[in-house]
């Protein structure tokens, strides 16, 4: 195992162990005790397994999981940022349909292998995004009658 | 013969239409690389909210059946398995297509899938009521151990690392305790208002299965799908029929292997296909032909992965223990309609249980008929750019999660769990045991509390939970499944280490 995945494994298993310890701490300190009987049982196993995994990662004995390489992270970052902005801010602020169409178009522009210089690629992307809006609106607003905070356009 | 009464319900125009939509949609989704059957079924759940429970399950069951079979299309024509269950199909199916026998390979795969699938569903129909009667003897301690068994079996058998699989199960069990305690009403682990009512299973399922796939698609960057759809020439269907039944050894090996593997919780279609392929090769006098475009390979693999579908639902419908990740998603679909599977399902909701089982039988036949016609279209859809697929799945995941309770909190939970799961998967954790923990957690806790009350009134906790034949058998299965998985993992590692050492020695010399 090279040093980068090893460090990553230590960080990842360390975070899981930290969550386990936090869960166990809350389970054993919160009241009423009866309500935390089952969480206490789970969190004890959780902490043991998490610390075992962390120990293995520190010693460099982790064999499973490839971690994250720079290229994949670079590829993921823009899409993930757009997706998170869409979910945590735009969907509520701009309206579901508008936000999802914008997010769809941006993601398509970011990841579509078609050349960015060609006008036909952009026309195709706009057409696909418009089609997506129509299908989603038809499915959710008309077929399923899902009430969204805002209508189709803001 | 009560079950025959409900056959007619499958063939009402509306239900039949749903079956058709589920089958054709499932075939297309199944052929799309990156869209697993579990994810396809999870994304479909929101579309069942406005349907009757039986109707919703018809749609989900048809989609489950046909996504598994649809995966063979891209496996044969593109050399990209549509789902992990179709990996074994690629070995001979794609070679057949390269040799100009694409249509024959597709016909054989759909016919073998239908034979295997029908056998599996018949097992589901005849075995479920028997097991349901047997399950009536289960008390709280047994149900507690069964829930734990469901998590540990999937955690240990379905994961590449036993410890990380079990740890994922623990995370799921903990997530299930978030919210208000059912008995005392105490607040537990409510760190954000979005989870004050607990974690809703449907958004969690959508997030855990769909979002990691979306991020994986992002990770590929602006890459074009580098696969060419092989041309499909005409091939008379009657010849394929004759060939499937002439290869009865491969067909029966695949069907039986798939059915048995399907009954074991945690062992999925991927293993069924590969084990059946391996067994068919070992028992075939033409074993040298396997891997060179031999029809027996396609028949064994495809009959196995579809034969697995029906039996994988037996533990779900009788004991409410999902046998596979897709069965866990179906359990979510049942719960959302207020249907609680278990030993009394066939007494309380016979219409739902029987209509669902029978619809899967109808789905297998439809899948076989339409599979052959939809294959060409499905292969074209499989070539849709990754960017479009990722964006569509993200949109469906957001809208689907929101539509559960018209709540943004569910969307946040879906996104947070999905993003977290992607990163956990990169480090060897897996979604299936986490989902099982999340779904079985409330069952385990409720029975644990009920059992501890009985134990306090009658005997000690230890005596109630750890003694009695059934308790001991269940605990033994938990321990054996973990022990077996640890042994397999260590053996696999030793093999890899030896292999590495040999390779290094060779390089040095």
Image (cartoon, coloured by chain):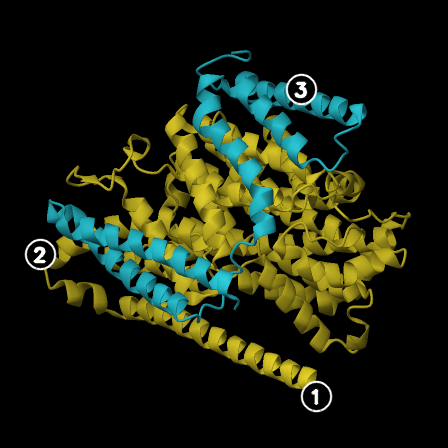
Chain colours: A cyan, B yellow
Closer to the camera in the image, B493 or B358? B493
Give the residue at x 56% y 30%: B395
Mark 2 to mark 3 CA distance (whole Å): 65 Å
**Marks 3 and 1: same chain?**
no
Q: Is residue B303 above or below residue A60?
A: above
Mark 1 neighbour density, 10 Å: few (under 14) some (14–19) many (20 or more): few
Point out the tag, 1 or 2, that comes first from the N-terminus. 2
Q: Quadrant of the C terminus of chain B?
A: bottom right
Left or right: where does residue B365 sit relative to residue B186?
Answer: right
Q: Which residue is mark 3?
A: A130
Mark 3 neighbour density, 10 Å: few (under 14) some (14–19) many (20 or more): some
User: Residue B457, labelled with which disc?
Assistant: 2
Evaluate if marks 2 and 3 touch, with contact meaning CB atoms under 8 Å apart: no
- Give the structural element (helix, strand or loop) at label 2: helix
Q: Which residue is mark 1?
A: B509
Q: In the image, residue B111 lies at what x, y percent? A: 74, 53
Give the residue at x 78% y 70%: B290
Q: Chain of mark 1?
A: B
Q: Chain of mark 2?
A: B
| Viewer-side label of 3, 1 | 1
């Amino acid at each position: 195992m090279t040093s980068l995945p090893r460090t990553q494994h230590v960080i990842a298993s360390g975070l899981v162990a930290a969550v386990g310890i936090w869960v166990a701490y809350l389970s054993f300190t919160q009241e009423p005790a009866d309500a935390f009987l089952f969480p206490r049982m789970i969190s004890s196993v959780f902490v043991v397994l998490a610390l075992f995994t962390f120990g293995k990662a520190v010693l460099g004995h982790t064999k499973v999981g490839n971690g994250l390489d720079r290229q994949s992270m670079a590829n993921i970052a823009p899409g993930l940022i757009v997706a998170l902005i869409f979910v945590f801010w735009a969907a509520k602020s701009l309206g579901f349909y508008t936000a999802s169409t914008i997010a769809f178009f941006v993601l398509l522009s970011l990841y579509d292998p078609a050349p960015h210089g060609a006008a036909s690629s952009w026309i195709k992307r706009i057409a696909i995004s418009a089609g997506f809006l129509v299908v989603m609106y038809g499915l959710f607003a008309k077929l399923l009658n899902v009430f969204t905070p805002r209508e189709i356009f803001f | 013969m009560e079950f025959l009464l409900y056959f007619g319900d499958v063939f009402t125009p509306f239900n039949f239409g749903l079956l058709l939509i589920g089958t054709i949609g499932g075939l297309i989704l199944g052929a799309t690389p990156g869209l697993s059957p579990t994810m396809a079924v999870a994304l479909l759940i929101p579309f069942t909210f406005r349907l009757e429970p039986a109707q919703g399950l018809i749609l989900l069951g048809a989609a489950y059946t046909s996504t598994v079979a649809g995966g063979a299309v891209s496996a044969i024509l593109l050399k990209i398995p549509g789902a992990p269950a179709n990996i074994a199909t690629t070995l001979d199916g794609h070679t057949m297509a390269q040799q100009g026998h694409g249509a024959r390979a597709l016909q054989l795969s759909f016919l073998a899938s239908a034979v295997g699938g029908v056998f599996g569903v018949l097992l589901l129909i005849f075995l479920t009521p028997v097991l349901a009667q047997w399950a009536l003897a289960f008390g709280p301690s047994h149900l507690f151990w069964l829930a734990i068994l469901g998590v540990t079996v999937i955690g240990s058998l379905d994961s590449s690392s036993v410890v990380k699989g079990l740890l994922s199960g623990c995370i799921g069990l903990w997530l299930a305790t978030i919210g208000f305690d059912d008995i005392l009403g105490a607040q537990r682990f409510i760190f954000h208002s979005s989870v004050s009512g607990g974690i809703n299973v449907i958004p969690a399922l959508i997030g855990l299965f769909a979002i990691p796939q979306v991020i994986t698609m992002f990770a590929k960057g602006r890459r074009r799908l580098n696969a060419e759809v092989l041309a499909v020439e005409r091939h008379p269907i009657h010849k394929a029929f004759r060939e499937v039944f002439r290869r009865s050894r491969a067909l029966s090996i695949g069907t039986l292997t798939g059915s048995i593997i399907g009954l074991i919780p945690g062992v999925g279609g991927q293993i069924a296909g590969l084990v059946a392929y391996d067994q068919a090769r070992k028992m075939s006098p033409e074993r040298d032909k396997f891997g060179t475009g031999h029809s027996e390979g396609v028949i064994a693999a495809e009959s196995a992965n579809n034969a697995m579908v029906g039996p994988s639902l037996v533990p779900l419908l009788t004991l409410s223990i999902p046998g596979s990740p897709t069965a866990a998603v179906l359990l979510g679909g049942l719960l959302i309609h207020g249907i609680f599977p278990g030993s009394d399902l066939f007494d309380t909701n016979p219409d739902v249980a029987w209509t669902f089982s029978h619809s899967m039988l109808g789905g297998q036949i439809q899948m076989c008929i339409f599979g052959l016609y939809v294959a060409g279209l499905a292969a074209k859809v499989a070539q849709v750019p990754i960017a479009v697929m990722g964006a569509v799945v993200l949109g469906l995941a957001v809208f689907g999660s929101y539509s559960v309770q018209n709540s943004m909190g569910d969307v946040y939970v879906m996104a947070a769990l999905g993003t977290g799961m992607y990163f956990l998967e990169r480090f060897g954790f897996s979604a299936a045991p986490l989902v099982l923990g999340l779904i079985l957690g409330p069952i385990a806790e409720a029975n644990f509390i009920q059992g501890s009350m009985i134990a306090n009134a009658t005997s000690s906790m230890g005596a109630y939970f750890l003694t009695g034949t059934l308790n001991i058998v269940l605990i033994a299965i938990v321990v054996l499944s973990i022990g077996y998985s640890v042994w397999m993992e260590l053996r696999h590692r030793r093999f890899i280490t030896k292999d590495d050492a040999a390779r290094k020695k060779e390089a040095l010399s």
